[in-house]
Every structure is written in structure tokens, then in C-alpha cells.
Image (spheres, coloured by chain):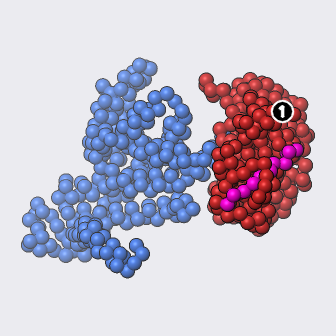
């Protein structure tokens, strides 16, 4: 139904290689998230799959069919753009109907699918408005509606939430996950926000400079990052990375310990330092500890009720079983 | 403009400009209206100092009953309409072409805009003598090269010739405005339409053309204002002969050739009325686009 296989796909813009040879398999029904810093090639990869860019070499197989030279409309994929890309002069109804009209589907069937999509996305009351009269979240839903009615083999989302405000983003995140659970269609979702990746994905693909750094479930990536880049990218706040003599004690070039795996105490612990800025979130507090002699700053997550003040001395103990060890090439040591 | 003081200061500072513009418009308008109700023949010794004879609506009746009046209105509308159709259609096509990434884009764009900088008199003379001359013109040579008899453009196809000349002048304007409009089109929309299965022509009619709606409206409105009063192109080519006498040209002939200021002024008032009728129609048809 919606299996996508990339085989030795490359993309060059002139002399610049954006995607070096890359292999990836996305199983049918999977919610896959491409995540990476900006400029890592994740959007390009999505556009290659969509057919909006031509591959320089390699194969893209959708449901076993080689698609790398087929025009976008024939690939059976639907895309939701970051800017929504709604047609401003058409009503919501016409926007959603547009792909159906282009496919030459008869009026009754069009109406049925629009009604159904509008019901799924809570857009029934807005069908006769224009995109300009809708809020950001509603526009995003119209864009998704336009994708749904085509009943595609897979949905492609290109940073769909980055134009929304924080509260709305959380809401839409849930809605898209819920939609995926209901439709069970393959979805590929591009984002630079690792929180979105962690919360939504069945499978995360971490990209850097066109290379796949690691592929796995959110928890796999969180628990066993394959290298320093993934270790630093996944998890919020970021993992503390310590190199030097302290790492050598563990037989590694660099060790990593997540803020939530450090226990703190006012009097005793393996490491000590001075509390710098504390971020109070209510449920949790993040202490940025300085002058530890280990790294510039170590972030520690504590219960919201723990009361250290700026300038207090603090002692920290990492949980021994949660220390990640990396060699001099940045690769994980098991 | 938040406080009472800044608001009144703003009014005070805008006043000179507003008064000047108002005077600039009202004085000639009032004088035209006044002259149109009088007998004013300078060659027969009429002058403002000696007082003009009030003749009521006589000038208006004479002007509209003249055998040249309705043909002139017709010529005006034909020329304006023809130029609008050509400049808008070609303007859209040229704008799309110029929007494509090509080598030497900057130079090409400047060349395309160039005709707009040529004075109407000059461009009409160039067209008349260099292109359309039945003996030495480029067209004549071209026709002869194919063994055809050269056309004497300005007498046998006078209205189309004038439309051609004026379109050539105004095409850059339309192209320029439409090009900037096309450049502001969100590329994602075109890509979304591509993903939605719209072929090139559908993308043009469903996405690009509606996006250009507002710019086309502006082109039509601005061009109409200027095209209703084209004069130099007619003066230096046909001199109003061969059915190219527009309302503007007729008024000119009444005032300057016949030295009848009263009659010409009445024609001027008719021209104002015609312009307003055209404006009302235009606003009805295309003005909706501006509300969006």
C-alpha cells in the first residue's frame, strides 16, 4: 500500500552534493520522521520522494514500482507544505476539491470525499470561507484535507507546524498523530524540532549533511544513540558531553549523560559545581551547573520542588548504567 | 497620528498640497464648463475681457449632432479596447517568459522596458517612417520579400496601425506590473498544484491567472485613463484621417483648427462624461478584484 524504498539515491545541485548515496526503507503504515539541523538535506530528500526534484541517480520505489522518473502527480503521494500553499482565490471546499477535479472524479464522489474529510478535520463550518479568513491551524487542516481526499499511498509533511504558535503546535501534533492512527497510511514528516520527532514518530531518521546518522524508534535513539551527533540532537535539554580525564576513567574519549540521569545533593556526590541559571518549569527544574571542571556547563534535571539558588554549591552523581561512552571518532562504545 | 496635536499638525501640513491639487483641478474644470456655455470664437474677436455671450446648450447640441461625433466615440473605444486586449494578453505571456531563469535576464528586462521611455511623438514617427512606410518601411520590404504588395498601413489599416503603435508603447508597462505580480506568486502553490495533478495549462488558469487578477485590474484601469487621451500618436501619423479621429482629437480640431473654444469645451465635457461611463463599467467588471 505505501512502502517506500530508496536505493542509492543521490542528489547534486551543480557541483554541490546534497544527498550522497542513501538507502532507506519506509514500511507501509509507518510514521517516519526525518529530523536534522537546517540544511541537512531532509527537505530535499522529501522533495525527491515527492518528485518535485529529480534524483541525480538511484531508485525510488513506491509499492515496489520504480518511480524516480514519474511526475509527482502520478506517484500517488500527497504533500502538506510548510506555507500551507492553499489557493487563496478558492474557498476551502474548492481547495479540497482541486485534486479531485484534476483527477476527473465525478461531482457526487467529490462531494462525498469532501464531506468526509471536512468531518474528520472539523472543517465543516468553514467550507465556504476563503483561506484568508481562517486561522493558521485551520489553514493547516485545510492543507491536510486537500491531501486526505486524494487517498494517497503516503502523506509527505514538510515542516507543517513551524508556522504555528507553540500552543497550537502541540494541538496539531496530537491531531496529526491521531489522524495517522485512524488512517494507518504511511506518513513521512520532516522537521527540525526533535520534540516533534520524539512525540510523533514510529521511526526517526536522523540526518546530517545528507547522511543518515541513525534510524530507529524514538526510544532506541534516546537510549542508544549511535554517535555523538545523535546523542546531542535527540533529547531535550541536550545530553551533557564530557571529554578528558573524566571520560578516560570510563575508558572512553567522550562520555554522555542526560540531565535526567544525574542525581543531585547539597553535600556529597561524584562531581561538584556552582549553580548558574535555573529554569523552573513547575514540574521540573533545570539547573545549569558551572565550574565543574568537566565541561563548560552541565545541565541537570531535578524535581520542581528542589530549591537550589544561583551561586549555591551543588554535588552531582551520574547514574552509572546511564552513561553513554563514545570513542575518538564519536562512535558509541557498547 | 495618535494625539490630537499630531493630527491637527498633519492636517495643517497637508493643506498646501491638497489646496494646490484641488485648485489645479477645479480652475480648468470650471473654465471649461463656463466656455462650453458661451460663444467663444477668438478669430471673430471674442475675448474674456470683452465678455462672452451666453448661448446655453447650443454648443452641446452642435457638438453631439456633428457627423464626426459618434464615429469619434467609436474610434476612441476601439483604440482603447484593442490596446487593452493586446497589452494584457501579451503582457501576461511576456511576464511568464521573463520570469523564467534565462541567461542575460537583467539586460533582456531592460530592453523589454525600453519602449516605455520613448516619447509618444518619437515612437509614432519611427513607426510611421521606419516600419509602416509603404515604400521604404520595414514592413514594405518584408512584404516585397515574400512577393506581396506592400500595405499602406496608415491609410488602409489605420485603426489597427494606431493600435499597434500604442500597444508597443504600453506593453512594457503591462509586462512590468504583471512580472512583479508573477514574482510574488508563492512557488509552493504551483508545486502543490503539480502534486495535485494539475498539468501546465491548468496550473496557469487555476493558479497563475487568478493570482494576476489584481495586477491585471490595475493595468486595465491605469491604461484606460491614459489611453482615452492619446493624441500625439494620431497627430503625427494620420492627423485624424482614415477613421482615427478620437474624441480627444476631435476636440483638438474644434479648438485649434476651427478656433471654436466654446464648441471644443462642450466636447471636453462630453469627454469627461465618456471617461466616467467607461470608468463605471470598468469598476463594475474588474473593480471587484480590488476588494479582495
Residue drawn at x 43%, y 34% is: B106
Q: Nearer the viewer, residue B142 or A144?
A: A144
Chain the render paints blue? B
- Residue at 77%, 42% (x, y): give it: A256
Q: Position of residue B101 (x, y in %)?
A: 54, 33
Q: Check the image and report above or below for B114 versus A159.
A: above
Is residue A44 or residue B134 the one in the foreground? Answer: A44
Residue A321 located within the stretch drawn in magenta: yes
Where residue B150 sits in the image (x, y, percent)? Answer: 38, 27
Q: Secondary structure at mark 1?
A: strand
In the displayed structure image, the side of residue B157 where residue B103 appears, left or right: right
Q: Is residue B2 left or right of residue B216?
A: left
Which quadrant of the rendered structure holds the C terminus of chain A?
top right
- Asked whether B178 or A124 is in front, the reply is A124
* Magenta-highlighted residues: A312-322
Residue A115 at least partly seen: no
Mark 1 highlights which residue? Answer: A333
Q: Position of residue B228 (x, y in %)?
A: 37, 55
Q: Report the chain shown in red.
A: A
Residue reaching furthest front?
Answer: A267
Height in image: A208 above or below B274? above
Amino acid at each position: 500500500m505505501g512502502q517506500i524504498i530508496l536505493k542509492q539515491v543521490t542528489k547534486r545541485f551543480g557541483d554541490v552534493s546534497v544527498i550522497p548515496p542513501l538507502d532507506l526503507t519506509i514500511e507501509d503504515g509507518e510514521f517516519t520522521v526525518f529530523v536534522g539541523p537546517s540544511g541537512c538535506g531532509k527537505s530535499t530528500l522529501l522533495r525527491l520522494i515527492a518528485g518535485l526534484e529529480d534524483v541525480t541517480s538511484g531508485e525510488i520505489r513506491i509499492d515496489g514500482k520504480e518511480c524516480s522518473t514519474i511526475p509527482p502527480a502520478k506517484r500517488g503521494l500527497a504533500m502538506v507544505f510548510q506555507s500551507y500553499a492553499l489557493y487563496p482565490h478558492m474557498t476551502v471546499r474548492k481547495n479540497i476539491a482541486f485534486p479531485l477535479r484534476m483527477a476527473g472524479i465525478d461531482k457526487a464522489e467529490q462531494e462525498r470525499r469532501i464531506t468526509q474529510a471536512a468531518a474528520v478535520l472539523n472543517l465543516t463550518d468553514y467550507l465556504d470561507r476563503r483561506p484568508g479568513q481562517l486561522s493558521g491551524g485551520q489553514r493547516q487542516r485545510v492543507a491536510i484535507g486537500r491531501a486526505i481526499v486524494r487517498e494517497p499511498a503516503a502523506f509527505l509533511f514538510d515542516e507543517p507546524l513551524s508556522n504555528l504558535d507553540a500552543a497550537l503546535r502541540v494541538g496539531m501534533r496530537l491531531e496529526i498523530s491521531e489522524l495517522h492512527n485512524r488512517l494507518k497510511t504511511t506518513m513521512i514528516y520532516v522537521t527540525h524540532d526533535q520534540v516533534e520527532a520524539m512525540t510523533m514518530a514510529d521511526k526517526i531518521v536522523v540526518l546530517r549533511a545528507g547522511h543518515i546518522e541513525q534510524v530507529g524508534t524514538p526510544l532506541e535513539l534516546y537510549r542508544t544513540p549511535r554517535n555523538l551527533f545523535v546523542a546531542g540532537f535527540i533529547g531535550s535539554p541536550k545530553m551533557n558531553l564530557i571529554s578528558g580525564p573524566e571520560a578516560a576513567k570510563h575508558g572512553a574519549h567522550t562520555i554522555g549523560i542526560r540531565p535526567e540521569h544525574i542525581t543531585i545533593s547539597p553535600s556529597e556526590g561524584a562531581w561538584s559545581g556552582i549553580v548558574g541559571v535555573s529554569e523552573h518549569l513547575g514540574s521540573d527544574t533545570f539547573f545549569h551547573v558551572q565550574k565543574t571542571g568537566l565541561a563548560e556547563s552541565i545541565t541537570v534535571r531535578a524535581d520542581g520542588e528542589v530549591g537550589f539558588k544561583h551561586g549555591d554549591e551543588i554535588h552531582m552523581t551520574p547514574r552509572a548504567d546511564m552513561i553513554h561512552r563514545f570513542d575518538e571518532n564519536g562512535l558509541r562504545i557498547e | 497620528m495618535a494625539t490630537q496635536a499630531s493630527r491637527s499638525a498633519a492636517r495643517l501640513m497637508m493643506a498646501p498640497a491638497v489646496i494646490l491639487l484641488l485648485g489645479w483641478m477645479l480652475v480648468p474644470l470650471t473654465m471649461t464648463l463656463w466656455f462650453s456655455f458661451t460663444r467663444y470664437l477668438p478669430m471673430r474677436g471674442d475675448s474674456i475681457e470683452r465678455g462672452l455671450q451666453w448661448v446655453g446648450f447650443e454648443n452641446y447640441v452642435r457638438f453631439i449632432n456633428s457627423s464626426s461625433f459618434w464615429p469619434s466615440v467609436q474610434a476612441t473605444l476601439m483604440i482603447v479596447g484593442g490596446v487593452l486586449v493586446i497589452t494584457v494578453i501579451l503582457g501576461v505571456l511576456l511576464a511568464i517568459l521573463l520570469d523564467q531563469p534565462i541567461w542575460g535576464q537583467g539586460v533582456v528586462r531592460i530592453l523589454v522596458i525600453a519602449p516605455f521611455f520613448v516619447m509618444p511623438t518619437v515612437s509614432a514617427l519611427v513607426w510611421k517612417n521606419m516600419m509602416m512606410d509603404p515604400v521604404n518601411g520595414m514592413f514594405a520590404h518584408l512584404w516585397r520579400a515574400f512577393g506581396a504588395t506592400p500595405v499602406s498601413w496608415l491609410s488602409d489599416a489605420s485603426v489597427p496601425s494606431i493600435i499597434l503603435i500604442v500597444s508597443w508603447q504600453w506593453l512594457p508597462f503591462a509586462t512590468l506590473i504583471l512580472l512583479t505580480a508573477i514574482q510574488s506568486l508563492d512557488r509552493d502553490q504551483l508545486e502543490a498544484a503539480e502534486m495535485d495533478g494539475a498539468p501546465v495549462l491548468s496550473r496557469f488558469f487555476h493558479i497563475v491567472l487568478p493570482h494576476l487578477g489584481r495586477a491585471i485590474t490595475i493595468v486595465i484601469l491605469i491604461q484606460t485613463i491614459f489611453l482615452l487621451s492619446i493624441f500625439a500618436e494620431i497627430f503625427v501619423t494620420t492627423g485624424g484621417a482614415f477613421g482615427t479621429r478620437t474624441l480627444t482629437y476631435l476636440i483638438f480640431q474644434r479648438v485649434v483648427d476651427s478656433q471654436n473654444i466654446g464648441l471644443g469645451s462642450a466636447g471636453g465635457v462630453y469627454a469627461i462624461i465618456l471617461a466616467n461611463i467607461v470608468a463605471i463599467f470598468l469598476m463594475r467588471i474588474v473593480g471587484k478584484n480590488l476588494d479582495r
